[in-house]
């Protein structure tokens, strides 16, 4: 059996996961779980999703070998180009799956949280495509640093609400989306953007991103005749990492999830419960959730998806962290050597590869380039001017 | 608390449980004012960084309390020295319990004189380990029942509830509403049909008239946002007058 099989009946990966939600939401989570199980086993649903991924999102995404940068680092560096998907990131895989599922469940409205805005844009896009209403919650700090994505969501016909509570970033956007869902659960589907939250989300979102790993594994075998030695992805909640890990978890490949230094939940290895799940969580001595700090809004999250906590706890994946300064350098490095501007989130993965390159000489390193950097250009103009 | 509530119900009294955010400036005076104005128990909120079941008023009070340095430890310490004669319950989010450890936290509540705990993000399926630790320490765990629950679920939730059963008045988070939601009475009626544990309606019971309406079908009410707003705007005295007004309304 695969190491990344179904969670337990209570939605657990080892001792992580579960369903810690207000009583009001329990029936909705149960209904979602039942609907997902039924849809995922239905060839008609699978065909419909595959079709929209192919003809709308642009799947399969290609592999790109970074010859210049690879030579410079002394390894074979290969990118899985999720940045080339429609809307510019991997987020569309999950959103199309959830939107089709919501439609099947008769829900006409989506709510979503977003950090960098990539999941918000993807949700707004799916809502436009399927004729659904959509409201996106976004921390007020992120609304400011990701103004371009805010405008894109509005252009796509969604409502964007700036969240002013708490740290005014991703975790507070999740709180507000959950509050909305508690009040509107009968008509609304919560389109959660990562492999986090209450069961069945961590599992369901992983399944919707499994396509990344499946494609990547087949492409690696075809082009290089083997699985990569190392598979690397950035981790906030951890959806793009879970997606690519799922293709290689039962192989010999080393799995590396890279967290920001200011949001290194896995490194601290302290379990907590927030946003419906038990997982590693940055918290103070009384269990108050701490604020993460990262240059990238998409990784500015104090927790991590429960399956990552599990993979870390059993030693199957490792979770180093990198500083903002390393990320800024990596962001520019990929642009100059390969002509690809990565999202700041993915620049974390590259920053780790650059740092660890001396220990990986001659190896094949597959990195999930989960999003493009256009959204970060305005922010980086300011950062680099200083 | 349950024994006392059952006795009061048998005597024909409707139960009034105000909510006060622990650690908010003046909260101890507010608790005493509630007791003096005819509350049957007090629910003290232990502020949490991410209160997903709370609307703007209680979020604001929680954030102010946290910024003022409130912690679970110092709130429990201060509860111990409150010296009020009615039962004290706490409302807290599960990570506060999880982080401290079930047995340890249950013992801390017990030694602070807290008789009951309400944990709104701990549904029936996840509640087992905490409830067992709380039972063992002699702390009652109040379960919440929601309007979205199918009929088969309600008796199971009721059977696990101690102290009273919290009947969630509407689909939504805490906060004041212009009218008592139709779901409030409907759920209380469904619950009364399946349990003899006292049923109190909370969430969205926003003034004396709504409280009076709620106790036509329920054994009592929990009132949060409207109480905390008066504490924020007018201090403990104004809040105490409000509790007295609600008391008169539900006694009529």
Image (cartoon, grey):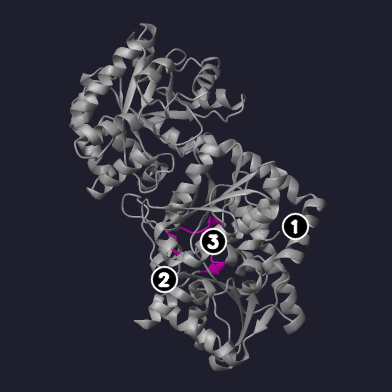
Whether the magenta-drawn stretch holds residue B165 is answered as: no
User: Residue A2 location in percent, x, y?
Assistant: 69, 61
Measure the C-alpha gap from mark 1 to mark 2: 34 Å
Measure the C-alpha gap from mark 3 to mark 2: 22 Å
For label 2, the SS is loop
Q: How many tags in the picture? A: 3
**Do the residues bearing badges 1 and 2 touch, measured as CB atoms within 8 Å?**
no
**Do the residues bearing badges 3 and 2 touch, measured as CB atoms within 8 Å?**
no
Q: Which of marks 3 and 1 is in front?
A: 1
> Which residue is at a point 37% across and 82% down the rendered structure image?
A385
- Residue A238 position (above or below residue A36): below
Q: Mark 2 points at which residue?
A: A295
Label 3 and label 2 in one chain: yes
Q: Name the residue under label 1.
A: A49
Q: In which quarter of the image is residue A216?
A: bottom right
Q: How crowded is mark 1: few (under 14 residues within 10 Å), some or many (20 or more)?
A: many
User: Residue A183 location in percent, x, y?
Assistant: 51, 37
- Identify the mark nearer the N-term, 3 or 1: 1
Can the viewer see residue A313?
Answer: no
- Identify the mark nearer the N-term, 3 or 2: 2
Q: Where is the N terminus of chain B found, in terms of image quarters?
A: top left
User: Residue A272 location in percent, x, y?
Assistant: 43, 51
* Near-viewer residue (A173 or B12): A173
* B138 displayed left or right of A127: left
> Which residue is at a point 24% across and 33% down the rendered structure image?
B231
Q: What stretch is highlighted in magenta?
A: A300-318
Q: Mark 3 points at which residue?
A: A308
- Identify the mark nearer the N-term, 1 or 2: 1
């Amino acid at each position: 059996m695969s190491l990344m099989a179904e969670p337990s009946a209570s939605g657990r990966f080892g001792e992580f996961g579960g369903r810690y939600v207000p009583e009001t939401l329990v029936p909705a989570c149960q209904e979602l779980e039942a609907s997902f199980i039924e849809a995922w086993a239905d060839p008609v649903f699978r065909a419909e999703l595959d079709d929209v991924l192919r003809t709308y999102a642009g799947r399969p995404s290609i592999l790109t070998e970074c010859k210049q940068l690879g030579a410079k680092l002394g390894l074979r560096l290969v990118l899985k180009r999720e940045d080339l998907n429609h809307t510019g990131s991997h987020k569309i895989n999950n959103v199309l799956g959830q939107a089709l599922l919501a439609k099947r469940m008769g829900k006409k409205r989506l709510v979503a949280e977003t950090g960098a805005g990539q999941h918000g844009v993807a949700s707004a896009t799916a809502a436009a495509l399927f004729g659904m209403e959509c409201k996106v919650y976004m921390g007020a700090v992120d609304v400011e640093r990701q103004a371009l994505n805010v405008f894109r969501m509005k252009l796509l016909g969604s409502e964007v609400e700036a969240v002013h509570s708490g740290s005014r970033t991703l975790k507070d956007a999740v709180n507000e989306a959950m509050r909305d869902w508690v009040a509107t659960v009968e008509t609304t589907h919560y389109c959660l953007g990562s492999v986090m939250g209450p069961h069945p989300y961590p599992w369901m979102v992983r399944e919707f991103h499994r396509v990344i790993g499946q494609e990547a594994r087949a492409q690696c075998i075809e082009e290089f005749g083997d699985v990569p030695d190392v598979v690397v992805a950035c981790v906030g909640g951890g959806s793009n990492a879970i997606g690519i890990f799922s293709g290689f978890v039962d192989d010999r490949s080393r799995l590396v999830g890279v967290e920001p230094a200011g949001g290194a939940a896995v490194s601290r290895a302290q379990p907590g419960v927030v946003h419906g799940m038990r997982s590693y969580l940055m918290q103070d001595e009384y269990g108050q959730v701490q604020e993460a700090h990262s240059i990238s809004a998409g990784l500015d999250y104090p927790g991590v998806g429960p399956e990552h906590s599990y993979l870390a706890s059993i030693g199957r994946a490792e979770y180093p962290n990198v500083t903002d300064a390393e990320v800024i350098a990596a962001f520019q490095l990929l642009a100059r050597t390969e002509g690809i501007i990565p999202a700041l989130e993915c620049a974390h993965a590259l920053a780790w590869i650059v740092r660890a390159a001396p220990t990986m000489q001659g190896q094949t390193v597959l990195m999930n380039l989960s999003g493009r950097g256009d959204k970060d250009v305005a922010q980086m103009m300011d950062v680099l001017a200083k | 608390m349950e024994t006392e509530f059952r006795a009061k119900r048998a005597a024909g009294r409707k139960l009034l449980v105000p909510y006060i955010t622990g650690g908010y400036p003046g909260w101890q005076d507010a608790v005493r004012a509630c007791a003096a104005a005819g509350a049957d128990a007090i629910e003290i909120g232990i502020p949490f960084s991410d209160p997903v079941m709370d609307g703007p008023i209680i979020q604001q009070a929680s954030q102010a309390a946290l910024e003022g340095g409130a912690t679970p430890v110092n709130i429990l310490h201060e509860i111990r020295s409150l010296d009020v004669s009615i039962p004290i319950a706490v409302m807290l989010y599960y990570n506060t319990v999880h982080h401290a450890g079930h047995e340890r936290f249950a013992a801390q509540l017990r030694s602070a004189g807290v008789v009951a705990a309400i944990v709104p993000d701990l549904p029936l399926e996840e509640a087992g380990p905490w409830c067992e630790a709380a039972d063992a320490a002699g702390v009652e765990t109040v379960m919440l029942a929601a309007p979205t629950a199918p009929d088969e679920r309600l008796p199971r939730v009721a059977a696990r509830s101690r102290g009273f059963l919290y009947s969630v008045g509407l689909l939504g988070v805490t906060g004041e509403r212009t009218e008592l939601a139709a779901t409030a009475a409907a759920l209380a009626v469904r619950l009364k049909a399946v349990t003899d544990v006292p049923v109190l309606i909370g969430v969205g019971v926003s003034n004396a008239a709504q409280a009076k309406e709620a106790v036509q079908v329920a054994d009592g009410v929990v009132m949060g946002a409207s109480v905390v707003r008066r504490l924020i705007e007018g201090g403990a005295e104004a809040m105490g007058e409000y509790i007295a007004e609600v008391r008169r309304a539900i006694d009529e």
